[in-house]
Structures are given as structure tokens and as C-alpha cells.
Amino acid sequence: MDPFARLPEGCISEILSLTSPPDASRSSIVSKEFKSAVESDAVWERFLPCDCPDIISKSVSPLKYATKKDLYFHLCHSPVLVDGGKMSFSLNKIDGKKCFMVGARQLLISWKGCWDFIPHSKSRFAEVAKLRSIGWIHIQGRIKARILSKNATYTAYLVFWLEKIDGLNSSNTVVRFIDNVIRKDRTANEQRVSRESGKMAKMRDDGWMEIEMGKFYNDDEDDDGEIEVWLIEINNPHEKFGLMVEGIEFRPI
């Protein structure tokens, strides 16, 4: 007799919800009881961020899904536009942590008169920023710490397209946490700064390139803070002509 047949489905669901999404999915081969439990909303609701309903309620287009499992994998594979199309939201497939990309229209870009905002067939956003004049580049973005997953390490990436994959490898990047609240053991407007340079770009699965801007740890005490990141490039201006920026992505490690 199958020993798992003696366990109530609710008990199996509770066990599975304490694992990870990949482990829960693999458990369906253990027995028919596990296969049934792993399809339950009770399991996948625990893997979804607690504020997921609020986030997807701000989606530009309504999401259609039959189960919480369907919703989980939809968000892993198909980022949704939120906040009036200014940002995209998705999930890390391994652990369900939240990923956001801030679109080009929401970035502070140097010499905006040197950039055009145009539609692009491969972009998730309505417009991307395209550099049309040669010059130095300063791209800056911000995101509120409270919307990211807590107690998680994030990496910020500039998502772009350029004919030369190494065209931004001489850039300098900065990640700065801006704390706007006075705390017992911190001063007001404390800034934790990380600076890096010489990063190489990589190709992404969605046809864009990305270059790492830096890492930061998002703890559970900084709900009122913001993460500010920027990229500065003043070298080899001729190699940047035609640069297109889709946005800045904040992705958990």
C-alpha cells in the first residue's frame, strides 16, 4: 500500500508549501496524492508574494489564469506591465521573489534632447530611449525598497541594445540606498553606496543586452527608502551611437 495514501491532502499541501516551487513540481511523481496536492491553490498561494494580488490589480491588461499555479508560472515567464505601463513585474522562477523593470520613460537620462523615445517590437514597454547624438551618457533610475522582496539580495541591470557588446564596458556604475527616515542607530538620509566599473555586457534570452550596475541587500527595515542606481559613460562616444535603452531591471539573486 502506498504510505502517502494515508496522509490527508491538506497535510501534503502544507508539506509542499514549505519546500520550493521546483521541488514542489518534482514531487508530483512521488504518488498520485502528491500530484493532486501540488496542483492545489493552497500550495502555490504560499509561493506567491503576499502583495501579489495588489500588484497585479494594477496591471495594464487583466490577467487570466485558472489556478494559482498558472498565475505563478505566467509571472515567471511573461512579465506584466503595472503602474500605468511604467514598470514591469515578474517572478523569479526558483523562489518566487519579485523582479521589476523600470521603463526608459521613467529614467533620468542625460541630455534628453539627444535621445528619441520610440516604439520597439522587442520591448515590453510602449517606448524605448534611443541615443541619436554622440556624447557622454548618464542614466539614472530609482525604485522604492518596499515593493521589492524583503531580506533578499538584488542586482540592478541596465537593459539595452548596442551593436558592440563591449560598448559600455568602460562605464562606471553606482548603487545607492537612500534612507529618508531617522532611525535610532542611523542618521537621516543615510546613503549606503556601492561603486563598480569595467563590467561586460551579456546577451539576454529576450534579445536585449544587460550590464550589471551593482548589488544591494534589501532588508526588512527600510520600507521608506529608495534604491538609486546610475550608469556614467564618458569614454569612446562614437561607440555609443544608436544605443537603445529599454530600462533598468532589479532582479533577485
Image (tube, rainbow, N blue to C red):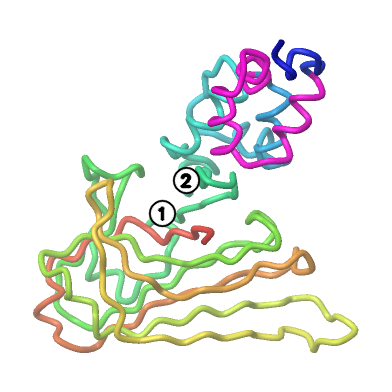
Q: Position of residue 30 (x, y in %)?
A: 59, 23
> Tags 2 and 1 in contact by the CB under 8 Å rule?
yes
Q: How would you classify the magenta stretch by its main secondary structure?
A: helix
Q: Which of 197/182 is in front? A: 197
In the picture of the structure, the residue carrying the numbered disc 2 is: 88
In the image, 36 versus 126, the foreground residue is 36
Residue sitting at x 65%, y 54%: 147
Toward the viewer: 92 or 127?
A: 92
Cα gap from disc 2 to disc 1, whole angstroms: 8 Å
Horizontal side, residue 11 vs residue 18: left or right: right
Residue lying at 30% horizontally and 48% vertically, measured from the top left? 127
Q: Quadrant of residue 209?
A: bottom left
Q: Is residue 196 above or below residue 103?
A: below
Dot 1 alpha-carbon crowd within 10 angstroms: few under 14, some 14 to 19, many 20 or more: many
Q: Residue 168 at what x, y percent from top left? A: 23, 77
Q: Is residue 21 magenta?
A: yes
Disc 1 marks which amino acid? Gly
Question: Which residue is located at x 55 percent, y 30 percent?
Answer: 25
State whether residue 76 is above or below residue 204.
above
Query: What stretch of residues is rendered in magenta?
Result: 10-39
Regarding mark 1 in the picture, which secondary structure is present there? strand
Q: Please give the label number shown on residue 43.
A: none
Label number found at residue 103:
1
Q: Position of residue 2 (x, y in %)?
A: 70, 14
The quadrant in which the N terminus is found is: top right
Amino acid carrying label 2: it is Ser
Residues packed near mark 2 inside 10 Å, few (<14), some (14 to 19) or many (20 plus): many
Horizontal arrangement in the rendering, residue 25 relative to residue 146 (left or right) = left
Q: Secondary structure at mark 2?
A: strand
